[in-house]
Amino acid sequence: MQLPALQDFMPLSPDWTDIGSRVALTLVAGICIGVNRERGGHSAGLRTTVLVGLAACISMIQANILLSTSQIAGGSMDVLRLPLGILTGVGFIGGGAILRRGDVTTGVTTAATLWLMTAIGLCFGGGQTAVGSIAALVAFVTLSPLKIIGTWLEVEQKASIGIRSGSGTDIPDISKSLPLGCEAQFIALRALDQGEHECVFELRWKTEHHKLGAVDLVEGVRAKHHVTSFEHRTTLT
């Protein structure tokens, strides 16, 4: 089977109409994907997503123009170097969006979205409108409907809770105050004022994303113990 020629996907001499359509398609894809991230309050929202896609698109258009210029001059150019360099550069930008606090990591989906938006921009900039459109549609479905499906799945939740104890070093037993299926593990003992101590426990339980149950859990423990701190360490992406 003979593969299509390169110029069938990337016209060697794109006109202004072709360039405008590529930029417009990238803008539409960036807005559709960026709105989802903006509504979720993520660090890379609408403007960041659009700008990343446009930067990739314009860079690929520039490579397209330079390729035609190089061929007219009788030279040669490795077109793959530019998109690979752009993807590598955006990888560093996406790495800056990833934050880690303890055993909780956030921003991974945001970084992956920027990387994918770069690839979509490269597709549109290179004239592969069909590939870019399909990738944008799949990305939108992944970030919107699939996220709703993810809220139905049972996942493990994590939290830490501090319990005030007396001047002694006895570790209180909070297992009877926890709902069924929730496990507590003692992880730290901290000194407080007047010789008292704070016992810190790590809590783990499984539930759906839209039924975190953190408030009910804390209220159940507060009924029998003096809760000094509580931190729910499982975040939604």
Image (tube, rainbow, N blue to C red):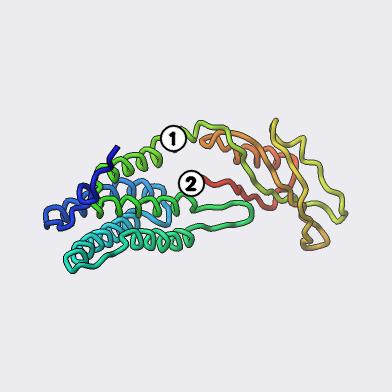
- Vertical side of 25 occupied by 209: above or below: above
Identify the disc placed on residue 71: none
Give percent across and percent down for residue 219. Answer: 65, 40
Among numbered discs 1 and 2, the one appearing first in the sequence = 1
- Vertical side of 30 occupied by 60: above or below: below
Residue at the spot 49% in from the left edge and 53% down from the top edge: 107
Identify the disc placed on residue 237: 2
Crowd band around label 2 with a 10 angstrom C-alpha radius: few (<14), some (14–19), many (20+): some
- Quarter of the N terminus within the rendering: top left
Q: Which quadrant of the view contains residue 102?
A: bottom right
Viewer-side residue, 224 vs 14: 14
Residue at the spot 49% in from the left edge and 35% down from the top edge: 151
Q: How far apart are marks 1 and 2 (CA)?
A: 11 Å
Residue at the spot 52% in from the left edge and 52% down from the top edge: 106
Residue type of the residue flagged with mark 1: Ile
Residue type of the residue flagged with mark 2: Thr
Viewer-side residue, 168 vs 3: 3
Give percent across and percent down for residue 129. Answer: 24, 46
The residue pinned by badge 1 equals: 148
Crowd band around label 1 with a 10 angstrom C-alpha radius: few (<14), some (14–19), many (20+): few
Residue at the spot 67% in from the left edge and 41% down from the top edge: 204
Give percent across and percent down for residue 142. Answer: 40, 39
